[in-house]
Image: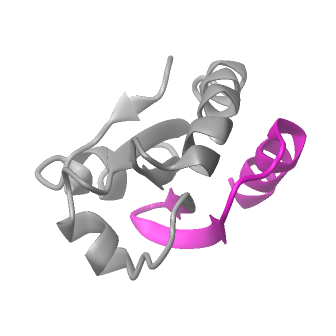
Amino acid sequence: MATTAVTDATFDTEVRQSDIPVVVDFWAEWCGPCKQIGPALEEISEELKGKVKIVKVNVDDNPNSPAQMGVRGIPALFVFKNGEVVSNKAGAAPKASLKGWIEGAI
């Protein structure tokens, strides 16, 4: 299960109403650190298949969701569990660090 693109219109359904924990990656095409962690998130999505869903929200195309979450910089990562934010992280990090953070939050 690769990462899923989520829009402002699908955010509540895909994230807040999900049966399993969801990691939301707020990113943009022009953001170097966002591109840096993209492949790691794809791999983690495969490794934790069934335990967590990883979704990406392009902040340029979908400004409402990041505004509601108070996102001021990207990449911004949020872990949702039962519709609520249980953890968040800003900036790029190595794959091992990202995976450890996600596993600790879910």
Q: Is residue 11 above or below residue 45?
A: below
Residue under the image location 79 percent in, 42 percent down: 99
Residue under the image location 39 percent in, 64 percent down: 83
Identify the image quadrant of residue 60: bottom left
Q: Is residue 101 at least partly visible in the picture?
A: yes
100 relative to 17 in the view: left or right: right
Find the magenta span and give its range: 78-106
38 relative to 106 in the view: left or right: left
Residue under the image location 51 percent in, 38 percent down: 54
Q: Is residue 79 above or below residue 71?
A: above
Q: Nearer the viewer, residue 25 or 18?
A: 25
Q: Nearer the viewer, residue 93 or 11?
A: 93
Q: Is residue 82 above or below residue 32?
A: below
41 relative to 72 in the view: left or right: right
75 relative to 101 in the view: left or right: left
Place of residue 28 in the rendered image (x, y in percent of width and height, measured from the top left): 40, 49
Q: Is-magenta flag for residue 91? A: yes
